[in-house]
Every structure is written in structure tokens, then in C-alpha cells.
Image: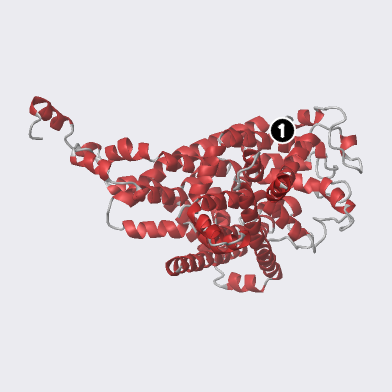
Amino acid sequence: MVNQGVLGRTRVRMLRPSKKTDLGPYGFVLPHLILFVVFMVLPVVAAFATSFTDWAIVGPVQWVGLGNYAGVLQDPSAQRALRVTLTYTVATVPTTLVVSLILALLVNREQWGNSFFRLAFFAPWVLPSAVVAMVWKWMLQPGNGVLDYYLSRTGLISSTNWLGNPNVALYALAVVWIWWSAGYGMVIYLAALQDIPQEFYDAAAIDGANGWQRFWYITFPMLTAATSFLVILSTISAMRAFDLFFLMTQGGPGGSTSSVVFQIWQSGFIENKMGFAATMSVLLFVAIFLLALVEFRFVRERAEVG
Amino acid sequence: MVQHIKWRRFFPSLVLWVITLVLAILWVMPTLWMMLTSLKLESQILTPTPEWLPREITWTNWELVFNKPILTWYWNSFVVAFFTTVLTVVVASMSGYALARMEFRGSRSLFLIYVMALMIPSEALIIPMYLLAARSNLTDTYTALIMPLVASTFAVYLFRQFFFALPKELEDAALIDGCSRLGAFVRIALPLATPALLAVSIMTFAFSWNNFLWPMISISTDASRTVPVGIIQYGVYGGPTARQDWGVIMAGMTAAAVPNLVVFVALQKYFVRGVAQTGFR
């Protein structure tokens, strides 16, 4: 400010803080906060409130207290929904992770066609669920469908009603899910792989480590952060799964693909038991919340120790 | 002798490449099959042995696709996704900036609440949201589709982490010179936030476009539907008692898939960056 002369004085005048056009911190935060309260906090409160009633869209609302909770915990379809979702989660999370990692390792090399490969593996992720569902439903048609045809021709598997067989349907959905979402994990792993300094591998090569040892002692440990993130994300995604269950099998056959969210939808919108559905929603909410909390703590501990 | 050694070193690489190629073809096959089926006559679709190429290219399936207001669905999807993205970027960047840069009473608690809100599954809220929307006459509206997504805290979290890591010097210099906080935000911080802006925009747009459960529940008139919800009607084309006409279904699916794929291929760099950023903790 000292040697600014005429220009300096003009500059100071132009940049005087004009309190009228400034926004305090609350001004910055308020717009989103209002939306957050109205469209997130309010529904959460409403969910809890409704779970204590027997609301059924039409008709008077009666306070039921913990009756719904007792009802849900004893209800066979709710218990089945829990089993279905847990089985599905256990089936998809590790498999998707492994597939994503394998794909990432394969495309991390310098080879001809890499951009095509990466596009091919990730592309399903941008498709709407209805497209994924109908295309696979068509391919899994017994006899007529492309996949069923080629699988039965290998002689290892006979033509199966993949989506109509209660023992198989859930796993068929798991395969579709892997096709749909492995590309996402691949991108995450790819980014993590490319962060590993080449020097580590060079040093290991000098020490005489072979490919498998290099993977197990360098690559794998360096992927811990990415793996933890993907485990959390996939677990929560699997517990929230709805679209494929609704579009491909409608919860059947025999309820073998009736996931928790599907059951919530069914109770609320088909059976018109809103209070019951709200109770299941609250339980799902609490379960996922606790799970995410536990996994966060676990990740943070490992990060601090490791 | 030399040839023999070269081949042995080359071989594993080749094997891996072939494996990758096979996997990539398997991955692409369903989409390809979908597109080819849409161009076939029903008689060819129902043959017991699958035939890949259409015997002759038929457009009848596609004509039937446009019997439904698919263009309206496209418009709806676009409007909803566009405004969701714009609003999210605006309010989330402001919130993220304030939480990262400005210390005010309750800022730590607020951020903690926002982080915890990340763990709330939207599927658990569809029941109360539907009840609230029905009572406020907001079903079948753009608002009902846009606002819940803008209320999400994911973008706020990303922006906050980004601004936190951004060096403060430039903004501090501006503030000392008498610039307002808002000015510093708009003229300095935002232009530097391009990576975060791109990541949030792409992820938000894609998520809004492909959103299924809530739009299916909250919208009941065909004219207000979005693409992912509208196209399921092709699955029951001809009424619930009619056989499924796979040609029409596949044409409808192709119509929904192609724009997404085209945009993805065109913007693939940003998609990949956007996804990678979400894993950036």
C-alpha cells in the first residue's frame, strides 16, 4: 500500500469490503441445509413415526406402539427377506471384488486394445436397471435364450429355468449384478494400482521375487484402502438391492428372490400395510447404518495400525 | 535358440491378452445381442437355435416402440437430471466450501451429521417420502424427483474434502485485499475446483437419470415418467395376457441404452475420473 500513489488509493477504494454483498457462513450452508431437513430429516422422522402406527393410506390411523416391530420380527416373509438379502450379500460382495480386481489387473498392462477393454467392462454401469434386467431375462430364457442355449450345449449344465427355479434364481441375479457392477470396482482398483510406485516392483525384482510373490507382498497390501472402500460400498449396495429383484423375478419364484427392499415395497404398495413397511424400513435403516459405522471404525483402525 | 526364448517370454503376455479379449467380448455380448434382436422378425427371434444376425433388417419393432411416449420420457429424464445436477452443484459447493473454510458454531457437528447421513439408504425412506409427497400433492412432479437427490450429502462431502485440501493462499490474499467471502468463493475457489465440479456433475447426472425406485413409486401418469421407468412397459406390451414380444422389448431397451452409451463413450475420461474420485477418501 505504501508506494501505490494515485493508483493505490483507487485500488483500495474499489476493493473495500462491501458487507452488503457478502454471505456469512450460514448463508453458504443454509440452502442445502433447508433441503436436507425437508427431504431427508423429515422422512426419517416420519418413518419412525409411521412405524408405530397401522397406517394404510385410506382409513383412520391407529397408534400401535411396538406392535409392528413384534409383528415384523415374527413375520415369516420378513424373516425370509432377511435370509434372501444376507445370502445375496454374501454371494455378491466377495465375488464382485475378486472379479473387479482381476479385470483391473488385466487392463493395467500395456496392451493393444486396452481402451476398448476398459470401455467394455465399465459400460454396463451406465445402463438403466430395466435394460439390464430385460436383456438378461431374455438371455436366460430356458431353451430359447442365448445364454441358456450355449450353456446347455457345453454339456456341463442342462437347460435350466434360471429365473424360475427357486434354488437358482437368486444366484442368477447375483451373476447379473456382477456383470453390471464389476466395472465400477475395476476403475477404483485401476486407480489404486496406478498409484503403486514402480520402484517397489523394481526392488522386488532385484531381490528375485517372482510374479506371485510380487502380487502378494506388494500389490495386495497397497490395495487395502481401495478394498475396504469397495467392501463397504458393495455390502451396503447389496443390502439395498431392489431393481433386479423387482424387474426380473418379482420376488419369486416362491419368494426366493424377495429381498428386504422388495418386501418393503410389497408390504407398502401392494399389501397396503404402510405401518408394517415403515417398520421394516426403520430396521433396514438401522442395520445399514450400524454396519457402515462398524466398517468405518474397522477401516480407520486398520489404517492407523497398518 | 533366440526365437525360442523370445516366444517363451511373449507367451504369458499373449495368453493374458486373449483372456482379456474373451472376457471383454463376453461383457459386450449382452448389449450386442439386445441391439441385434431389436432388428429381427419375431419368427426369427423364436427359433430354437439362436441366430445372431437378422435375416433381414426389420424396423417394425422400432415402430412399436414409438407407440409409447418415449420422447416425452426422454424430455422428463433430461429436465430432472439437468436441474438436479445444477442445483446440487450450486448448493453442495457452497456448503462444502463453508464447512471446509469457515469456522462457525456448529460446523463440526453439521459435517458429522452430513457424513452420517451418507449411510442412510434412500430405499428405507421411500415409504415416508411417498406418504409425505401424497399429502403435499407432490406426486407426479419434477420437484419430487429433483429435491430428494439435491438434499443428499454426498456432493457436500466431496466438495468439503476437496476445498479442505486446496491451498488457502490465493483466497487469503484476496480476503486481505478486501474481497468478500462470496467473491473469494466464486472468483478463486470455484475456478480451481474443476475436478470436483466435473466429478459431482457427472455422477449426479448419471445417478439421477438412472434412478428407478423412487420415480417408479412417485409417478403414476405416463406423461410424467422418466426413461428407466417408462420402458418397463415394453415388457408387458400387448397386455398382461399377451406373449412377451422380445423384439419390441429389445428395441425399447436399445432406445434407452444407446443414448447412455453414446454419452459415456464421448465423456469416458470424465466418467472414469468421476468414479475414481468417489473412492478418494
What colouring does the structure picture have?
secondary structure
Residue at 61% over, 74% down: A70
Residue at 45% over, 56% down: A41
- Hey, which quadrant is residue B39 in on the image? top right
Residue A183 visible in the picture: yes
Amino acid type at mark 1 = Lys
Q: Whole-percent x and y of residue A75?
A: 68, 71
Is B251 placed above or below A189 here?
above
Residue in front for this viewpoint, A88 or A217 = A217
Residue A60 visible in the picture: no
Point out the image quarter for the N terminus of chain A. top left
Residue in front for this viewpoint, A222 or B200 = A222
For disc 1, the marked residue is B68
Residue at 89% over, 35% down: B44
Q: Is residue A214 left or right of residue B70?
A: left
- SS at mark 1 in the image: loop
Residue in front for this viewpoint, B83 or B269 = B269
